Amino acid sequence: MWIRSTLTYRASFAMTLVSGLLLTGLDFVGILLMFSQVDSLGGYTLPEVAFLYGLAGMSFGIADLAIGSVARLGTRVRDGSLDTLLVRPAPVLAQVAADRFALRRLSRITQGALIFGYALTALDVHWTPEKVLLVPVTVLSGGAIFSAVFVAGGAFQFIAQDAAEVQAAFTYGGGTMLQYPPTVFAKEVLRGVTFVFPLAFVNWVPASYVLGRPYPLGLPEGAAWAPPLVAALCCALTGLVWRAGVRSYRSTGS
Amino acid sequence: MGPARLYVAVAVGGFRRYATYRVATAAGVFTNTVFGLILVYTYLALWDERPHLGGYDQSEAVTYVWLGQALFATLALQSGGMETDLMERIRTGDVAVDLYRPVDLQLWWLAADLGRAAFQLVGRGVIPFVVGALLFPTALPHDPVRWLWFLCALVLAALVSFGIRFLVALSAFWLMDGTGALQVMMITGLFCSGMTLPLNAFPGALGDVVQALPWAAQLQMPADLLMGKTGALHVFAFQAAWALVLLAAGRLLVTVATRRVVVQGG
């Protein structure tokens, strides 16, 4: 329904898509500005950074398209309109995700794919069948990991009702972080986003394999194929957290 | 009530309005700290590659990052101030009521916005800045006079920031829907104020252009003043000149728009 309503105003949709493309492309312009002054950042060249950026961008775009509406859950908890969703005979999470499903979020995926395309043409990678297969696996797993982060953030909003910005710090902050090479960050930060909050598997680890770079934190060789497992684990854990969140919901006025 | 007391009351109201949302403020502090951390690491890598880029050493680049995070909400660099409220009042026509009131439209919103800025500086700006200064080596002056000048520069920066956002909000008189104007403001706010990269590290002619634009008065100029890169007189003159131009343009636009409202009202 939300797709059809969006497509009714074709010109407006095209405008938001284009301006969305410009807005989401801003952080890459920032990276280009940095590379106008240097040849490498943390030892990575511009095409390599673009490769990381493209992978993270597409994954984030998939998650944002599928489940990004969860970010507004805090508003629904605050004004009590979540009640309406709870009495309907459909999973709450599916309803929250479909609520104001914004097709304009396609611009994020498009932009990620464009930068990724540039990286592919500019990079000098020796492609093997494994590496080719790893790319779609990585993008889908990354999308699942980011989705889990979005849902976990949504569950957090059941408790802290107007803390949407905390969620933004993890989703958008995580997305921004992955645009840069892992070599830029301190060891403790890397440990945090690998073992505690496994964002490193969205792009850093598999990209290291494809680009022939040393793995962050000296992870074992097989770690490049871990993203689907990590994604499954994240989704399972998030499912539990989400259930706990829904159960703790007490509507307004009580 | 005297006019001065009225505007002070409006400013206090602006301060209180934002002070009400404590959890949201804490969440904002957290977000600014996280983004500051990410930016600090990328800047350190950048300055590792090009020491003295833009005339900064590493500790100065780090200081710049945390100043940016502290002033991001204070100066509403990417919007987030009065402009959305005013746009909504223009779109719905409520602004007609405001124009009938015995107060000056521009001064009223300026007072409310200064109150908001004061709260955001204390509530959202100080903590990320302190956290940043504790975690990384920074280049902060010990001279209290420099801090005093910096605070003066912040007041002028708040005036410039309001001047820009007031103009953007008034565009709603002609455009009706402010989404496009706000999006443009987000882009210019991010790049031209130097949130992405210090303006003095921009390449070539682009750097000269952005440093002459009013956005430079908001983050770049106060930061350079605090770190002793430019003289106070130069900074104040630049900021005051842009503030005057923007506020005068705002006044002019209100007069023009008021005539339009009368025509619309029949």
Image (cartoon, coloured by chain):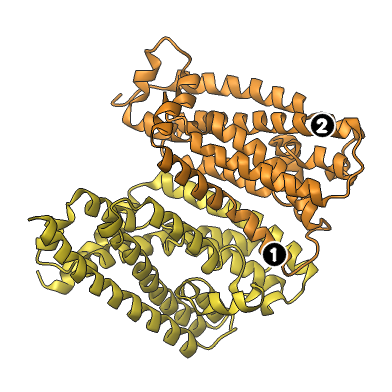
Instruction: Indicate the colour of chain A.
Output: orange
In the rendered structure, find residue A134 and report the number of the disc placed on it: 2
* Towards the viewer: A19 or A146: A19
Q: Secondary structure at mark 1?
A: helix
* Towards the viewer: B254 or B163: B254
Q: In the figure, residue B5 lies in which quadrant? A: bottom left
For the residues beneath circles 1 and 2, the answer to whether they share a chain is yes
Whether residue A183 is visible to the viewer of this picture, yes or no, is no
- Identify whether A146 is placed above or below B146: above
* Horizontal and vertical percent position of residue B243: 36, 78
Residue at 44% x, 60% y is B185
The amino acid marked with disc number 2 is Leu
- Identify whether A247 is placed above or below A80: above
Whether residue A27 is visible to the viewer of this picture, yes or no, is yes
Subunit ID for the residue under disc 1: A
The amino acid marked with disc number 1 is Met
- Identify whether B19 is placed above or below A221: below
- Identify whether B197 is placed above or below A21: below
Chain letter, yellow: B
Residue at 14% x, 66% y is B259
Which residue is the site of mark 1? A34
Is A52 displayed left or right of B245 in the figure?
A: right
Residue at the farthest top position: A89
